[in-house]
């Protein structure tokens, strides 16, 4: 999925059952490219050339559990969190707008969404093109 010049620490891919469970609980039509990434690497980590500069991708099982348990809903409604930066930011689909869902970073220490949400990419395919790219490479 990623060229050899990308920095991505890959886990084995998600099972069909894990992907199907995630599709069922998501509540929205998440992009096919997101599921392809999980099929390739069920969780993993890689660089981003823009803030927050790192992606720690949640596994399909963790994303499913977080949605079922409504982990983020109280303080971060309107988002589907699928990872973090490893340093204080969630990375999520912004479901407050229409499809294609923008990808955003959310400062996990600030529940004021007007202050804490920063756009990373206009959609998941654009975000996918950033994964594994070092800042110096752009």
Image: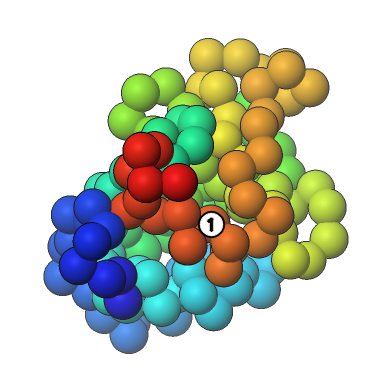
**Residue 23 visible at all:** no
- Give the residue number, with chain letter if any, for mark 1: 127
Q: Nearer the viewer, residue 45 or 58?
A: 45
Seen in the picture, residue 37 relative to 90 is either above or below; the reply is below
Q: Nearer the viewer, residue 114 or 133?
A: 133
User: For the residue labelled by badge 1, is the local secondary structure a helix, a strand or a loop?
Assistant: helix
Q: In this rendering, would 17 be left or right of 127?
A: left
Residue beneath the point at 36% across and 64% down: 60
**Residue 111 visible at all:** yes
What is the quadrant of residue 19 in the picture? bottom left
The quadrant in which the N terminus is found is bottom left
Q: In this rendering, would 133 be left or right of 42?
A: right
Residue beneath the point at 37% across and 46% down: 137
Seen in the picture, residue 92 relative to 30 is either above or below; the reply is above
Residue beneath the point at 66% across and 32% down: 118
Q: In this rendering, would 50 be left or right of 29?
A: left
Percent of width and height locating residue 20: 44, 80
Q: Mark 1 Cα within 10 Å, few/some/many (few <14, many 20+)?
A: some
Residue beneath the point at 53% across and 57% down: 127
Seen in the picture, residue 87 relative to 17 is either above or below; the reply is above
Percent of width and height locating residue 29: 66, 73
Percent of width and height locating residue 80: 59, 50
Q: Nearer the viewer, residue 49 or 18?
A: 49
């Amino acid at each position: 999925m990623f060229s050899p010049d990308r920095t991505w620490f890959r886990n084995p891919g998600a099972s069909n059952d894990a992907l199907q469970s995630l599709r069922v609980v998501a509540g929205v039509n998440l992009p096919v490219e997101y599921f392809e990434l999980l099929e390739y690497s069920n969780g993993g980590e890689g660089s981003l050339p823009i803030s927050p500069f790192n992606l720690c991708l949640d596994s399909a099982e963790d994303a499913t559990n977080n949605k079922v348990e409504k982990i983020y809903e109280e303080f971060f409604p309107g988002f589907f969190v699928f990872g973090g930066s490893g340093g204080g930011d969630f990375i999520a689909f912004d479901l407050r707008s229409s499809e294609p869902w923008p990808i955003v970073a959310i400062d996990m220490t600030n529940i004021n969404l007007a202050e804490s949400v920063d756009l990373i990419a206009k959609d998941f395919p654009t975000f996918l093109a950033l994964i594994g790219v070092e800042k110096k490479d752009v």
